[in-house]
Image: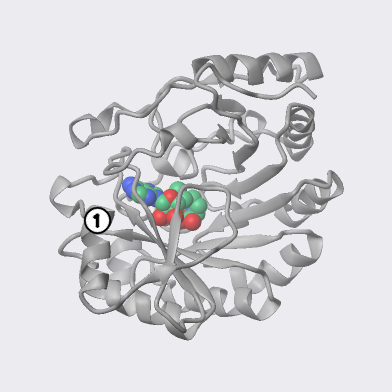
Amino acid sequence: MEELIDKYGRKINYLRISITDRCNLRCRYCMPEDGVELKNHSEILSFEDIIKIVKVGQKLGVDKVRLTGGEPLVRLGVVDLVSSLAKLKLKDISMTTNGVMLAAKVEDMKNAGLNRVNISLDTLKKAKFEEITRRDYFDKVRAGIEAALETGLKPVKINTVVMKGFNDDEILDFVELSQNKNVHIRFIEYMPLGGEAEEEYFMSSGETKELIESKYNLVPAVTKGNGPARYLKVPGALGTIGFISALSEHFCSECNRMRLTADGRFKPCLASNKEVEIAKTMTEKDIYKAYQRALEIKPSAHHLNFADNDKHNRKMSQIGG
Ligand code: SAM
Ligand code: SF4
């Protein structure tokens, strides 16, 4: 089988699909208060096109997909999309969601074929949640996490962006959550990607780990995933903790992913403005060519830094994380 292996020897087998730019939250580090300029329906990939793109990817070795956004659960028919993806017999279908609509939809998503879910939550305090997200949906997200656990989706991961002086006082509370519930907390370094990016908020994974280790002796743990997080746990805990250190420790040399934007472009690296538009005709040949071109321009590493925060052509909410 032909494979997607780039000039740096990295094999691409994981496609992250942003299915919408829309979102029901406005997280300060990700999306402006007024949202982003929304595309017309005709500019957004149809589910049919997404399936075509995944099918061509499969022929090239892509066997894992993740739905993201914007907020994937706000797109109408998302359950049908998961059903269609499930028919392709991929190894893994996952989703990253803010959890607001999860309690209402997780059962249907699981029955359609979703394997697992990552839920974003940066604080365990209602008022602070509203400050970060500019919306009053904290209770819905907590209910979404419980619903995901109840359906038996495994693993349930929680994405927590750590911000110094803002939610670092809750790091140990999140660790405690991993002790009491079968959830996997991923502490994510704050990335300057077009949102309100204040460098003083940046806290490295090393600092976060040090803070946790001032209280706990962590031991290695195993959690299923396709990405760069390394997992540890408090002995006896039901869940685990992991660190995603995009800035302090590049994991680019192990990158196995390609991103597809809602408007039909391959984005080989989340931090680079280079993209490949897939021809509107969406023939198998066009899609194949776009995969190959995207592979050619995938950079060896990213150069994310706070000084260039406003130089990105897309906000994080238009890339999907
Ligand atoms: N709306 C969904 C959600 O929030 O989970 C999916 C899209 S969101 C862009 C994907 C992930 O990117 C979330 O976990 C979010 O916390 C993370 N993210 C967004 N902006 C970020 C930033 N500036 N630095 C680090 N992570 C960020
Ligand atoms: Fe929306 Fe997710 Fe961005 Fe928050 S992080 S604004 S929930 S896309």
Name the one closer to the observer, 5 or 39.
5
Q: Position of residue 7 (x, y in %)?
A: 53, 16
The quarter of the image holding the N terminus is top right
Q: Position of residue 216 (x, y in %)?
A: 29, 78
Rendered residue at 25%/62% (across/down): 208
How many neighbours does mark 1 have within 10 angstroms: few (below 14), some (14-19), or many (20 or more)?
some
Q: Is residue 179 above or below residue 190?
A: below
Residue 125 visible in the current orientation:
no
Rendered residue at 32%/79% (across/down): 173
260 on left or right of 131: right
Q: Is residue 60 above or below residue 73?
A: above
Q: Position of residue 107 (x, y in %)?
A: 73, 71
Name the residue beneath numbered marker 1.
206
Name the one closer to the observer, 150 or 246.
246
314 on left or right of 320: left
Asked which secondary structure carries label 1, the reply is helix
Q: Position of residue 237 (x, y in %)?
A: 46, 81
Where residue 280 sits, quadrant-wise, is top right
Q: Is mark 1 within 8 Å of ligand 1?
A: no
What is the basis of the colouring in this image? one colour
Name the one closer to the observer, 136 or 171.
171
Rendered residue at 39%/38% (across/down): 315
The amino acid type, in three-letter code, at marker 1 is Gly
Residue 284 visible in the current orientation:
yes
Rendered residue at 79%/32% (across/down): 55
